[in-house]
Image (tube, grey):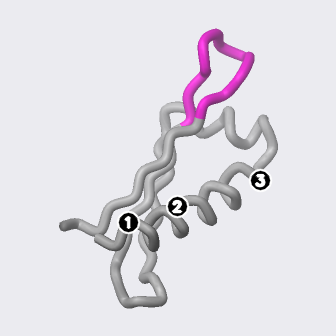
Amino acid sequence: MNEAEARSILSRELKAFTSRSYAQLAALIGHPHVKNLVSESGVNYQIEFSVFWDSKAEENLRIMGSIDDGG
């Protein structure tokens, strides 16, 4: 996996994912969001974002993202 490419893609996708409202993100708690895409270099990537309460319910959210090329 090209780590620089993967980090760039993950960063771009995270920015788009977090543009959602607090209510929209909170509704995704317990429901991971998975997206498959093909990079400009032709590599197939799978991206997953999970949303959690940071410490207490109904307060701050934490978002965890990962990217994998299946290798």
Q: Is residue 36 above or below residue 25?
A: below
Which label is found at residue 19? 3
Q: Residues within 10 Å of mark 3 (few under 14, many from 20)?
A: few
Q: Which residues are magenta?
A: 51-62
Q: Earlier along the polypeptide chain: callout 3 or callout 1?
A: 1
Q: CA distance from mark 2 to mark 1?
A: 10 Å
Residue situated furthest left in the rendering: 71
54 magenta-colored: yes
Place of residue 21 in the rendered image (x, y in percent of width and height, measured from the top left): 81, 44
| Front residue of this view, candidates 37 and 29 | 37
Place of residue 42 in the rendered image (x, y in percent of width and height, measured from the top left): 37, 89
Give the amino acid type for the residue marked by disc 2 in the picture: Leu
Q: Is residue 21 above or below residue 61?
A: below
Give the amino acid type for the residue marked by disc 1 in the picture: Glu
Q: Residues within 10 Å of mark 1 (few under 14, many from 20)?
A: few
Dividing the picture into quadrants, the one containing residue 58 is: top right
The residue to which callout 1 is attached is 3
Side of 25 relative to 46 (left or right): right
Side of 2 relative to 56 (left or right): left
Give the amino acid type for the residue marked by disc 3 in the picture: Ser
Side of 21 relative to 9 (left or right): right
70 magenta-colored: no
**In this view, the mark in front (2 or 1):** 1
Residue contact at pointers 2 and 1, CB within 8 angstroms: no
**In this view, the mark in front (3 or 2):** 2
The residue to which callout 2 is attached is 10
Q: Secondary structure at mark 3?
A: loop
Residue contact at pointers 3 and 2, CB within 8 angstroms: no
Q: CA distance from mark 3 to mark 1?
A: 24 Å
